[in-house]
């Protein structure tokens, strides 16, 4: 069953027919990974262990390595992410916070997938 097409922090999207749009395949996996990384644990009342709280790590000492570790520890909790080859996670400091690029192999299609996001301090 496909998820609603929804990027965390944005509105739901509408299909060409006016219905709520759905995401499947690689897009669904990308949205799930992004949602996990940007959600704080305990934000989902019925799943208090869900979420990586990456935004909370921005601005702390050694934040680039810590953020990379948090992402690596959480990304495999999503079935869409293949464990081999190992995902490439790049964290770059920018003047307003951090920029993150994650490249991984989609476990359902076997094709390369990527996610990028910025977090301001």
Image: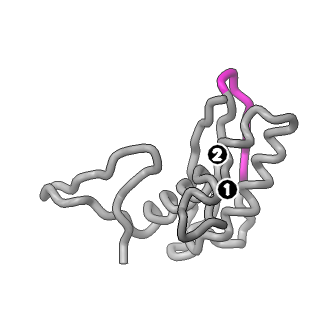
Magenta span? 89-96
Q: Quadrant of the N terminus?
A: bottom left
Residue 92 falls within the magenta-colored stretch: yes
Q: Position of residue 87 (x, y in %)?
A: 70, 60
> What predominant SS class does the magenta segment belong to?
strand
Q: CA separation, marks 2 and 1?
A: 16 Å
Q: Quadrant of residue 4?
A: bottom left
In the image, is 109 to the left or to the right of 102?
Answer: left
Q: Position of residue 102 (x, y in %)?
A: 65, 51
Residue holding disc 1: 52
In the image, is 72 to the left or to the right of 29?
Answer: right
Residue lying at the far front in this picture: please name it.
Answer: 45
Q: Position of residue 78 (x, y in %)?
A: 60, 70
Residue 67 falls within the magenta-colored stretch: no
Residue in the image at 75% along x and 54% along y: 70
Residue in the image at 66% along x and 29% along y: 121
């Amino acid at each position: 069953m496909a998820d609603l097409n929804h990027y965390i922090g944005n509105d739901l999207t509408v299909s060409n027919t006016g219905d709520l749009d759905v995401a499947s395949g690689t897009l669904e996996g990308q949205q799930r990974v992004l949602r996990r990384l940007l959600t704080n644990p305990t934000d989902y009342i019925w799943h208090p262990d869900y979420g990586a709280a990456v935004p909370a790590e921005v601005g702390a000492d050694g934040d680039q390595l810590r953020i990379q570790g948090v992402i690596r520890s959480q990304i495999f909790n999503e079935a869409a992410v293949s464990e081999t080859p190992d995902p490439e996670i790049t964290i770059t400091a920018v003047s307003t916070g951090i920029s993150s690029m994650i490249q991984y192999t989609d476990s359902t299609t076997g094709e390369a997938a990527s996610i990028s996001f910025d977090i301001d301090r």
